[in-house]
């Protein structure tokens, strides 16, 4: 497997490609990073003529969903253009964006337009493990208030994603492995095959979903938010009509009838918001994709799916460090219990992520001589790599001082590691980790 790391501003954007060239895009970075840094390099990172077999949207934070929405918007504009070309309208202007790779499926626990209080089974209700943790009354959740504004911006983006992939627009299958329902940990679930890669959902779990039900129902009852929802729905209907107008009349009538049936949101699964975490394996190599999840939940998900035995450790080839290396998402135990050949830190210093204390915990788990800090895993003595999705010299000025401190810390650790640690910073073309 090869993991390609794109510069995604303060967010995540990773491309996972298997030995048979099947590919998964995990998140798309911020709205501004996608067109400038991800889109121009995504095609080149894919195999020749490659398509995105799956786009995984871990959760709706703007620094993950913004780029995915940009990808889908580009795909939509190119679909409109192609339909006009097929109809003989050669005067219709070509989109300003480059043509994106085809998207064959989306995994995303989507936020739909409507919700009712306390309706249906919990598996069909609101879900967002990482976000739910931020709403919990606990010391590590102290930034919950500051997160509110970001959440408010992300909800409309998530709704637009749902509209873009719908049957009356791009017709991209949503959560096909779960028959359109939530992608979450279920008893006895089988891994999902993407070519030769096997992906197991390790989060969220049903017990975590209750944490958001009250919060989202409250948000939806706010009249200002209702106005936003109505605006997005109206725009979605206009976009659907653009698709219909681009087809011959008979097809337009057929699609209009289908769109009317699909517009009945009362029959759709109640709104949900979930953070996806995956364990992906191929030919004996393992990759942990943790989104913005909490390390406790990574461990819990691995145990629930049989990937990790209680009171034991696990060594994987690649660990995407949870939530940009935030101190609120990594316990002291986690770096000792889960070790990797390659640690991937996404972020550019925003909110001081990756945190120095978190980086130190990972370093100590591999380099310390203190048994209380060093991992007991047999592979702890092996060589390992730190990968960072940015370069301190090219960061926005206000984040540069922190990333310089990060750079100093890891370079000093590498120089004193006796060759055990190598560090890599993304300064131009995407980084590629091959396992």
Image (cartoon, rainbow, N blue to C red):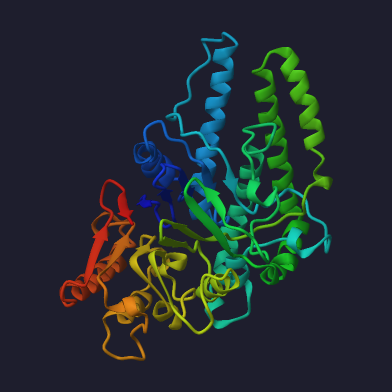
Residue 404 placed where, x, y %?
Answer: 25, 66
Residue 50 placed where, x, y %?
Answer: 42, 35
Residue 55 vs 333, above or below: the answer is above
Residue at 82% across / 34% down in the picture?
261
Residue 360 seen in the figure = no
Residue 170 vs 256, above or below: the answer is below
Q: In which quarter of the image is residue 45?
A: top left
Residue at 46% across / 33% down in the picture?
100
In the depicted view, which residue is nearer to us: 358 or 95? 358
Left or right, 82 with respect to 156, comes to: left
Residue 338 placed where, x, y %?
Answer: 42, 75
Left or right, 418 with respect to 310, comes to: left
Quadrant of the image containing the C terminus: bottom left
How many circles with numbers are drawn on the protein? Answer: 0
Residue 357 vs 165, above or below: the answer is below
In the depicted view, which residue is nearer to us: 93 or 52? 52
């Amino acid at each position: 497997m090869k993991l390609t790391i794109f510069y995604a501003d303060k967010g995540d954007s990773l491309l996972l490609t298997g030995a048979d060239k099947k590919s998964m895009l995990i998140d798309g970075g911020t709205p501004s990073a996608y067109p400038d840094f991800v889109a121009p390099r995504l095609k080149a990172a894919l195999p020749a003529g490659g398509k995105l077999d799956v786009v995984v949207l871990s959760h709706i934070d703007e620094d993950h969903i913004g780029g995915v929405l940009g990808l889908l918007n580009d795909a939509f504009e190119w679909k409109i253009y192609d339909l006009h070309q097929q109809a003989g309208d050669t005067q219709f202007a070509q989109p300003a964006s480059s043509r994106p790779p085809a998207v064959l499926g989306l995994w995303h626990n989507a936020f739909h337009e409507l919700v009712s209080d306390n309706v249906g089974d919990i598996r069909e209700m609101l879900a967002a493990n990482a976000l739910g943790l931020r709403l919990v009354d606990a010391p590590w959740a102290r930034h919950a208030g500051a997160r509110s504004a970001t959440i408010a911006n992300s909800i409309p983006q998530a709704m637009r994603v749902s509209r873009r992939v719908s049957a009356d627009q791009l017709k991209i299958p949503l959560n096909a492995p779960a028959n359109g329902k939530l992608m979450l940990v279920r008893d006895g679930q089988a891994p999902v095959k993407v070519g030769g890669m096997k992906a197991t959902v390790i989060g969220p779990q049903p017990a975590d979903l209750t944490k958001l039900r009250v919060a989202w129902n409250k948000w939806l009852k706010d009249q200002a938010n209702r106005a936003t929802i109505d605006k997005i729905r109206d725009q979605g209907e206009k976009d659907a009509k653009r698709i219909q107008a681009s087809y011959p009349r008979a097809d337009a009538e057929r699609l209009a009838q289908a769109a009317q049936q699909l517009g009945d949101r009362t029959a759709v699964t109640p709104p949900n918001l979930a953070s996806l975490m995956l364990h992906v394996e191929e030919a004996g190599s393992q990759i942990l994709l943790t989104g913005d999840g909490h390390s406790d939940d990574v461990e819990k998900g691995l145990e629930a799916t049989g990937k990790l035995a209680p009171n034991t450790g696990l060594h994987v080839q690649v660990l995407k460090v949870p939530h940009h290396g935030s101190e609120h998402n990594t316990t002291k135990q986690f770096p000792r219990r889960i070790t990797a050949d390659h640690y991937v830190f996404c972020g550019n210093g925003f909110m001081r992520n990756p945190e120095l204390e978190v980086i130190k915990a990972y370093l100590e788990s591999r380099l310390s001589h203190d048994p209380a800090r060093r991992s007991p895993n047999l592979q702890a003595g092996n060589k390992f790599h730190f990968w960072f999705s940015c370069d301190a010299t090219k960061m926005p000025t206000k984040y540069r001082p922190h990333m310089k401190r990060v750079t100093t810390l890891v370079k000093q650790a590498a120089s004193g590691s006796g060759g055990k640690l190598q560090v890599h910073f993304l300064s131009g073309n995407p980084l590629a980790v091959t396992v």
